[in-house]
Image (spheres, helix red, strand yellow):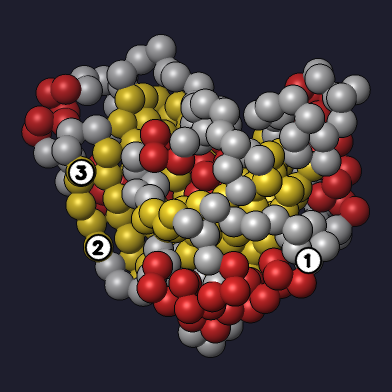
């Protein structure tokens, strides 16, 4: 699983499998696509594979001509199929295998076993800054590999949405920024101070998505890691900016933007 900023050596397309309240399928030009299905219906490897198969089967002719086999594909997954853990900056952990082992141990400290049956990825995005480790089940990766091969493509990258939001920084930013990703079954937040990750939270949707968002913001505001950060920018995926402004009334950022997860450059 490679981070989103690592360019492939081959032409590539991107597909997002997004968990939303209503079904939607569309190709955004010849190189990107989004497939959304009703909430909760993409919780298994087979369901994800079926969604990807249907999406690739609908590829327009222009896309197939532009990207002949064996082209590459990057797949974005809903956060609900992955696990995440914030890693504190540790200068002595510069070897990838050692950092990965550190991430596995951190998962185990919060009773999330990812040692067997999970692919774990973590890397530092900048010096003296925390990072986000994530784990995806091998069953999901195997199912996606099978569908991608069926369509004559090569699976270059698999990223949950929160991992895309964190690793999608192509350049350094120095904002106090809150990034919120809201899907059908989870709401997640990444908080940055002066461009450095200070907090990550996920809230499972129980009841309405609006209630889940309120609980998430409340947890952020009560956290010692977040209380001293005065926001100057807010980036949203799947969230109504007007509704969020009402929740954040006491700490309104100066800039609010809605990000298309398929446009990786927008995360800068």
Disc nearer the start of the sequence (2/1): 2
Element type at marker 3?
A: strand
User: In this image, 168 relative to 227: left or right?
Assistant: left
At a point 68% along the width and 35% down the height, the residue shown is 121
Element type at marker 1?
A: loop
- The residue carrying mark 3 is 28
Element type at marker 2?
A: strand
Q: In this picture, is 118 found above or below 200?
A: above
Residue 215 spot, x, y in % from top left: 63, 78
Question: Would you call the spot at circle 3 few (<14 residues within 10 Å), some (14-19), or many (20 or more)?
Answer: few
Residue 44: image tag:
none
User: In this image, 210 relative to 166: left or right?
Assistant: left
At a point 88% along the width and 43% down the height, the residue shown is 105
The quarter of the rendered structure image containing the N terminus is top right
- The residue carrying mark 2 is 24
Residue 74: name its quadrant.
Answer: top left
Q: In this picture, is 241 found above or below 236?
A: below
Q: Nearer the viewer, mark 1 or mark 3?
A: 1
Disc nearer the start of the sequence (1/3): 3
At a point 75% along the width and 39% down the height, the residue shown is 130
Residue 220 spot, x, y in % from top left: 69, 67
Q: In this picture, is 95 found above or below 219?
A: above
Residue 223: image tag:
1
Contact, mark 1 vs mark 3 (Cβ under 8 Å): no
Q: Is residue 79 visible to the viewer in this orientation of the structure? A: no
Q: Is residue 107 visible to the viewer in this orientation of the structure? A: yes
């Amino acid at each position: 699983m490679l981070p989103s900023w690592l360019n492939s050596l081959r032409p590539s397309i991107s597909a997002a499998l997004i968990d939303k309240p209503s079904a939607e399928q569309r190709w955004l030009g010849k190189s990107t696509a989004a497939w959304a299905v009703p909430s909760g219906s993409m919780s298994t490897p087979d369901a994800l594979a079926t969604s990807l198969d249907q999406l690739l089967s609908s590829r327009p002719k222009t896309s197939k001509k532009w990207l002949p086999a064996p082209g590459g594909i990057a797949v974005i997954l809903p956060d609900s199929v992955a696990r995440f853990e914030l890693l504190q900056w540790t200068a002595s952990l510069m070897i990838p295998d050692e950092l990965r082992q550190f991430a596995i141990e951190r998962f185990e400290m919060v009773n999330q076993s990812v040692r067997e049956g999970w692919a774990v990825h973590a890397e530092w995005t900048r010096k003296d800054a925390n990072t986000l480790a994530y784990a995806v089940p091998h069953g999901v990766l195997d199912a996606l590999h099978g569908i991608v091969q069926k369509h004559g493509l090569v699976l270059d990258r698999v990223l949950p949405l929160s991992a895309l939001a964190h690793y999608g920084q192509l350049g350094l930013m120095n904002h106090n920024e809150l990034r919120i990703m809201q899907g059908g079954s989870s709401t997640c937040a990444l908080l940055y101070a002066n461009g450095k990750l200070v907090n990550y939270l996920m809230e499972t949707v129980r009841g309405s998505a609006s209630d889940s968002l309120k609980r998430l913001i409340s947890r952020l505001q009560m956290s010692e890691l977040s209380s001293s950060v005065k926001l100057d920018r807010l980036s949203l995926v799947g969230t109504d900016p007007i509704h969020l402004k009402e929740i954040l009334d006491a700490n309104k950022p100066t800039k609010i933007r809605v990000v298309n997860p398929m446009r990786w450059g927008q995360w800068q």
